Amino acid sequence: MDVLEAIRGRRSIRQYRPEGVPGQKLNQVLEAGRWAPSAGNRQPWRFIVVRDGELRRRLADIAPFGRFMAQAPVTIAVVIDLQGSNHPVEDGAAATQNMLLAAHAVGLGACWIGSYGSTYEDEAKEILGVPADRRLLSLVSLGYAAETPQKDRMELGALVSDERYEEK
């Protein structure tokens, strides 16, 4: 699958089949995160792979828009160091997006659950043992999709302006 096909075909998956994620596919997803661009190549992220069902359930219980993490076989937490880069949030977001695209490319489903600045970020950090001086940017549920959602996009012409901003 080429990158443009992955971009166009990726969807947020919130229903998962029960089978586990093979180690090779998980490593491909994590490698995609590792190879994301970052300001000054500082790579201010760390990834926590959560396979334990009880931990995933605890995360799902506190995340209002991430209840489905309990049924996904894997959750990847993306932790950033705010002192580790001039743009750590953007860097971590790039790593998260790379993992979402890689998951789709290797036949897995995934969904980005934002946690940065959420009402549950501190509690999720505690559950995962994240140090106080780090931020939990996102949680990515991962597994084999049990749904095939379809979504449309706005027309490109409605999103693009020439030379200066124009609301269309």
Image (cartoon, helix red, strand yellow):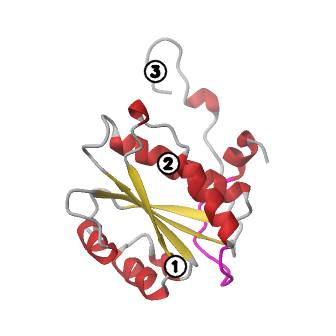
Q: Position of residue 20 (x, y in %)?
A: 65, 80
Q: Are marks 2 and 1 in contact (CB under 8 Å)?
A: no
| 148 sits to left or right of 81 | right
Q: Kindly identify the amino acid type of the residue bearing the numbered disc 2.
A: Ala
Instruction: Out of 97 and 157, give the one closest to the viewer.
Output: 97
Which residue is at 37% across, 73% downward?
63
Disc number lying in front (3 or 1): 1
Q: Position of residue 131 (x, y in %)?
A: 24, 64
Q: Residues within 10 Å of mark 2 (few under 14, many from 20)?
A: many
Name the residue carrying label 1. 51
Name the residue carrying label 2. 95
Disc number lying in front (2 or 3): 2
Q: Which residues are magenta?
A: 10-21
Name the residue carrying label 3. 166
| 119 sits to left or right of 30 | left
Q: Are marks 2 and 3 in contact (CB under 8 Å)?
A: no
Per the image, label 2 sits on a secondary structure element best described as: helix
Q: Classify 127 as above or below 94.
A: below
Q: Position of residue 166 (x, y in %)?
A: 46, 21
